[in-house]
Image (spheres, rainbow, N blue to C red):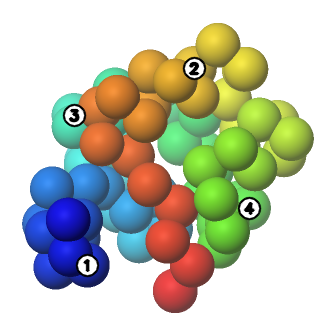
Amino acid sequence: PDIVDCWQRNVNLNTASRRELSQQIGMTEGEIERLIKGRQFHNIDELQSSGVVKPNRIAELKAKGAVAAFV
């Protein structure tokens, strides 16, 4: 897929609104708060090492279209 396709089908965690994070990705309020405080992740796996989400949530977030494209 090209870059435009990725941007249209995925949710960039570095720029997504609270609503997108909650409704489209299914993140909890606590996860959203931790994510926003540490924003500008280079890849989605940094969410685990930064304590934003637990390790078992990474695969679920990826499956729902979450990406971490540095902006």
Residue closest to the far bottom: 71
The amino acid type found where label 4 is placed reads Gly
Looking at the rendered structure, which numbered label has been put on residue 23?
3
Going from the N terminus, do you reach mark 3 or mark 1 first?
1
Which percent across, then down, holds residue 25? 32, 35
In the image, taking residue 64 as reference, residue 2 lies left or right, namely: left
Q: Residues within 10 Å of mark 1 (few under 14, many from 20)?
A: few
Amino acid found under the numbered disc labelled 3: Gln
Q: Nearer the viewer, mark 3 or mark 1?
A: 1
- Does dot 1 land on a helix, a strand or a loop? helix
- Image position of 32 (left or right of 18): right
CA gap, disc 1 and disc 2: 25 Å
**Where residue 5 sits in the image (x, y, percent)?**
14, 69
First in sequence: mark 1 vs mark 2: 1
* Residue that carries the numbered disc 1 in the rendered image: 3
Q: For the residue labelled by badge 3, is the local secondary structure a helix, a strand or a loop?
A: helix
Left or right of 67, for residue 11 = left
Mark 3 → mark 2, Cα distance in angstroms:
16 Å
Give the image quarter of residue 33. Answer: top right
Pick whichever, 42 or 24, lies toward us: 42
Residue underneath mark 4: 38
Which circle, 3 or 2, is nearer the viewer?
A: 2
Residue placed most toward the observer, 5 or 57:
5
Mark nearer the N terminus (3 vs 4): 3
Which class describes the residues within 10 Å of circle 2: few (<14), some (14-19), or many (20+)? some
39 and 58: which is toward the camera:
58
| Residue 57 tag number | 2
